[in-house]
Image (cartoon, grey):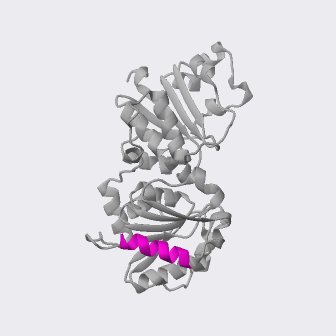
Amino acid sequence: MSPNEQALLFRVGGLGDLLVALPAISLVRRSLPRFSLTLVGRPEYGALLKRAGLVDEVLSFDDVRVAEVFRGPDRAASGATAKADPAAAWLGEFSLALGWLNRDRDWPGGGWWARRGVARAFFTCFDRSADVPMSRFFFDRTGDFLNTPSDRCFDEFARLTIPSVLREKALADLGLRKHKPGEKRLVVHPGSGGRAKCWPLAGFLEIIRWAGSLGVPGVLVTGQAETDLEAKLDGRPLPDGWSKVARLPAETLAGLLSEATHYLGNDSGPTHLAAACGASVLALFREDNVPAWRPFGKTRILAAPAVEAIAIQSVLNALQDLLAE
């Protein structure tokens, strides 16, 4: 493949971090259809974008070829040294480098990339004074850089297509059937990577009991960061039609969420994934996190200065409205 048709994409962080850059990455894919796109990030999450056809290869930040970018102060090496470095030679295969950053950090500038044969580099850092969420900020700045038409539709680029084979495998692995037209399936994820982002577990269990009383089936999901919740859930009965699963691989979680009609969760990666998969999402947020991290899609947000201050009746009312739509 010609170097003029290869781009290197960077996104640091976890699942939620990757998904707020999803619309921007989708825009790159649409704007550069002839390019091969290599994403540097968390492989287990980047695999979802590869499955969706948005990128062609996924590399970990631990890959030796990527280490050159993060070498530190000595990375501004002379041209001769840069050319002799095998990692620098690999970078020279790319004509374009793009990255999306949550905050300012020491990142190589345009001259550094040019010395390694990368003709163009675009790295944008979220501006917290912006009046749009991070996902929209990245999308707009990327569109400006790529000079894409001004009538581009954000919502069109904010969906993650999960292949049917992943959806079917997830249902089979979890012992679930595909819901019929008109049926509902609620997925509840009571965790988050930060404890300050978590609504009380007792509230989620009350919501599940309420949904079960209405005959709404669902799945209670806990993730890699929530072993403390797993211990608290041991022995807790769930209503008929409800099951509990823990630590799902990213592809299984994506398959499950793409088959959910509704979702309830905190400010977390799975919440962003549910929104990207098209579920009707009710997200519980701390107020100070909403401006930057608001999920896109069919999402309703309830927020308070401290997430535990969100009243359970407010959650019940909002979820009832969503289920009635």
Q: Is residue 234 visible?
A: yes
The residue located at (62%, 19%) in the rendering is 111
Instruction: Report which quarter residue 72 is drawn in.
Output: top right
The residue located at (59%, 64%) in the rendering is 303
Which is nearer the eye, 282 or 192?
282
Task: Decide whether residue 13 is among the magenta residues.
Answer: no
Magenta part of the chain: 313-325
Task: Kindly report the secondary structure that dominates the magenta region of the rendered protein.
Answer: helix
Give percent across and percent down for residue 44.
49, 51
Q: Is residue 55 visible?
A: no
Give percent across and percent down for residue 71.
68, 31
Figure quadrant of the C terminus? bottom left
The residue located at (59%, 17%) in the rendering is 115
Give percent across and percent down for residue 135.
51, 46
Give the vertical position of 273 relative to 132 (above or below). Answer: below
Give the vertical position of 155 relative to 274 (above or below). Answer: above
Task: Decide whether residue 317 is among the magenta residues.
Answer: yes
The residue located at (66%, 65%) in the rendering is 195
Figure quadrant of the N terminus? top left
